Image: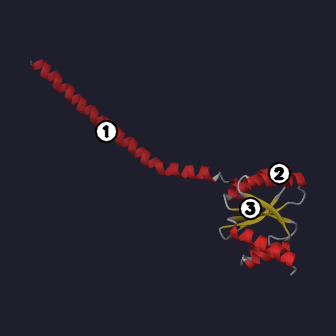
């Protein structure tokens, strides 16, 4: 392999190795302006879109010991989206771009060592943002505690009312007896 190719393989391997996720897309038909806009949007969520030759991509993935099922995604012109943040956010940006430009097309991806089909990447894109999911989870954890606090508060208020009523009764009984 030529030194230039070796350098490219090394660069792609390092990107793949340090990425939390990889999304593979078919970008054919996107104009240079659309690609630039897509790169800009993806950069906002810590992702990077890079067009990579299939041979270089395949070689880098093999060096990392990635599954053959992932290597099968590499047919035709491809771009990889790599990032270390929330894959859902990057997938949503790609999905919005697809609705806007009719491209790119999901080919698949990889997340936490698992190969994802195009359909699974699409499903990740449809998930609510990570912060929203965390907020819902925390809300469901806090709901029983909030309910318990409300019940205890109500019991305490009723107990205080009973004490107040008893005190009032004593005062009126004492005032009548004098």
Q: Is residue 102 visible?
A: no
Q: What SS does tag 2 mark?
A: helix
- x then y, percent, for residue 174: 12, 22
Q: Is residue 134 above or below residue 163?
A: below
Marks 2 and 1: CB-CB under 8 Å? no
- x then y, percent, for residue 163: 23, 33
Q: Is residue 131 above or below residue 154?
A: below
Task: Report the residue marked by disc 3.
Answer: 119
Q: Residue at x 66, y 54 (%)?
A: 127
Marks 1 and 3: CB-CB under 8 Å? no
Camera-side residue of 103 and 56: 56
Q: Earlier in the sequence, mark 2 or mark 1?
A: 2
Camera-side residue of 62 and 141: 62
Between the C-alphas of marks 1 and 3, the distance is: 54 Å
Q: Is residue 36 left or right of residue 65?
A: right
Q: Residue at x 35, y 38 (%)?
A: 154
Task: Report the residue marked by disc 1.
Answer: 156
> Colour scheme in the image?
secondary structure
């Amino acid at each position: 392999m030529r030194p230039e190719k070796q350098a490219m393989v090394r660069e792609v391997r390092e990107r793949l190795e340090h990425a939390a996720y990889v999304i593979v897309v078919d970008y054919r038909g996107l104009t240079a302006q659309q690609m630039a806009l897509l790169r800009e949007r993806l950069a906002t969520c810590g992702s990077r879109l890079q067009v990579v030759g299939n041979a270089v991509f395949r070689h880098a993935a093999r060096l990392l010991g990635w599954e053959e099922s992932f290597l099968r995604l590499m047919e035709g012109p491809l771009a990889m989206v790599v990032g270390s943040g929330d894959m859902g956010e990057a997938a949503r940006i790609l999905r919005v771009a697809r609705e806007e430009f009719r491209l790119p097309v999901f080919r698949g991806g990889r997340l936490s060592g698992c190969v994802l089909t195009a359909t699974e990447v699409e499903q990740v894109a449809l998930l609510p943002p990570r912060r929203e999911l965390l907020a819902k989870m925390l809300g469901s954890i806090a709901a029983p505690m909030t309910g318990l606090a409300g019940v205890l508060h109500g019991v305490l208020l009723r107990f205080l009312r009973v004490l107040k009523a008893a005190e009032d009764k004593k005062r009126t009984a004492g005032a009548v007896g004098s």
